[in-house]
Image: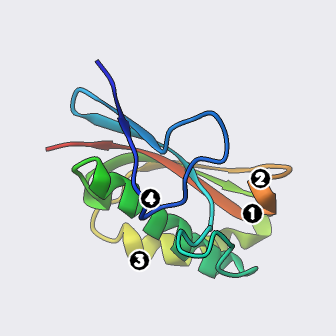
Amino acid sequence: MKEIVSTENAPGAIGPYSQAIKTGNLVFCSGQIPIDPETGEFVSSYVAEQTEQVLKNLSAVLEAAGTSLDAVVKTTVFLTDMGDFNAMNEIYGRYFNDNKPARATVQAARLPRDAKVEIDCIAVIA
């Protein structure tokens, strides 16, 4: 059994997918890009500020699913430039200070709407 998770506190899907899917005690969040859900625009062109918004968006989706960033067990970070790794990682570390999930970080040739960073995650529901 699966349940679609949706919230207006994060950007809506820009394609044929859900913000997240809940099944059993797991939540699978689709990748988030740095769109401010209130304006529909990117928050900035800087990767640090984009990472901050991406994590706020993921947090909103997880909250709608009944969990939080504290329950994340795995993330995948996509960067268009691995040279942005340190700036992304500094912000990422603030959100996952005590809870350090497993993670993969990869460089992608291009991300939706030319974002510099996209992050997806898997979390548990306690």
Give the alpha-carbon distance from disc 3 to disc 2, as whole Å.
23 Å
| Quadrant of the drawing holding the N terminus | top left
Residue identified by numbered label 1: 115
Task: Give the Cα separation between the discs numbered 4 and 2.
Answer: 17 Å
Say whether residue 91 is visible. yes
The correct choice, above or below, for 60 with respect to 71 in the image is: below
Q: Which residue type carries mark 2? A: Leu
Q: CA distance from mark 4 to mark 3?
A: 14 Å
Q: Which residue is mark 4?
A: 58
Q: Secondary structure at mark 4?
A: helix
**Does the residue at mark 4 contact the one at mark 1 (Cβ under 8 Å)?**
no
On screen, residue 49 versus residue 55, left or right, reads right
Decide if residue 80 is in sight here. no
Q: Residue 82, percent across and down? A: 76, 62
Q: Are marks 1 and 3 in contact (CB under 8 Å)?
A: no
Numbered disc in front, either 3 or 2? 2
SS type, badge 1: loop
Q: Amino acid at mark 4?
A: Leu
Q: Which mark is residue 111?
A: 2
Q: Which residue position holds label 3?
A: 94
Nearer-N-terminus badge (4/1): 4
Estimate the spatial distance between the alpha carbons at disc 2 and disc 1, rounded to whole Å: 5 Å
Q: Helix, strand or loop at disc 2?
A: loop
Q: Are marks 2 and 1 in contact (CB under 8 Å)?
A: yes
Q: Earlier in the sequence, mark 3 or mark 2?
A: 3
Does 16 sit above or below residue 14? above
Type of amino acid at the residue the image marks with label 3? Arg
